């Protein structure tokens, strides 16, 4: 069965760093574009970083220059390195996978909490 599991969330001080991991199973990971989303209470779920099957990356303006997305295909894992964290980065962070075909379904993890607080 298809599964995406996020890990690495927790409590961190402003200006600190954290690395999130997401490991997939049950699908051809290397053929999928992978993304990180986040959602704060009362707000929409927003895409903040993505990496496609050719390692092309994109970032939301809110995290550009601070966050880095990468992938390790042999281990079916995508990472999000988060530096210079701010209070407004507090959210539940979700991992997703997408294949470029009309018949393909998107896959989602259940999320991991990141809290930035002094």
Image (spheres, rainbow, N blue to C red):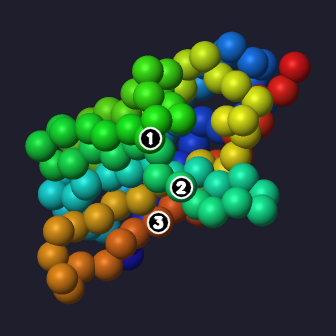
Furthest toward the bottom, the residue is 103
Residue 79, given in percent of the width and then of the height, sits at 41, 36
- Distance between the alpha carbons at the discs numbered 1 and 2: 9 Å
- Distance between the alpha carbons at the discs numbered 3 and 2: 13 Å
Residue 93, given in percent of the width and then of the height, sits at 59, 49
**Mark 1 secondary-structure assignment:** loop
Identity of the residue drawn at 18% across and 82% down = 102
Point out the tag, 1 or 2, that comes first from the N-terminus: 2
Identify the residue under disc 2: 46
Identity of the residue drawn at 59% across and 25% down = 18
Identify the residue under disc 1: 60
Point out the tag, 3 or 2, that comes first from the N-terminus: 2
Does residue 33 appear anywhere in the picture? Answer: yes
Residue 82, given in percent of the width and then of the height, sits at 54, 26
Residue 43, given in percent of the width and then of the height, sits at 70, 60
Quadrant (top left/top right/bottom left/bottom right) for the C terminus? top right
């Amino acid at each position: 069965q298809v599964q995406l599991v996020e890990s690495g969330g927790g409590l961190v001080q402003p200006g600190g760093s954290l690395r999130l991991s997401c490991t997939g199973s049950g699908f051809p990971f290397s053929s999928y574009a992978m993304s990180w989303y986040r959602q704060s209470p009362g707000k929409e779920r927003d895409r903040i970083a993505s990496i496609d099957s050719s390692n092309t990356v994109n970032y939301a303006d809110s995290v550009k220059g601070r966050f880095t997305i990468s992938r390790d295909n042999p281990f079916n894992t995508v990472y999000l390195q988060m530096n210079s964290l701010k209070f407004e980065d507090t959210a539940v962070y979700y991992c997703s996978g997408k294949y470029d075909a009309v018949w393909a379904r998107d896959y989602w993890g259940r999320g991991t909490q990141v809290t930035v607080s002094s």
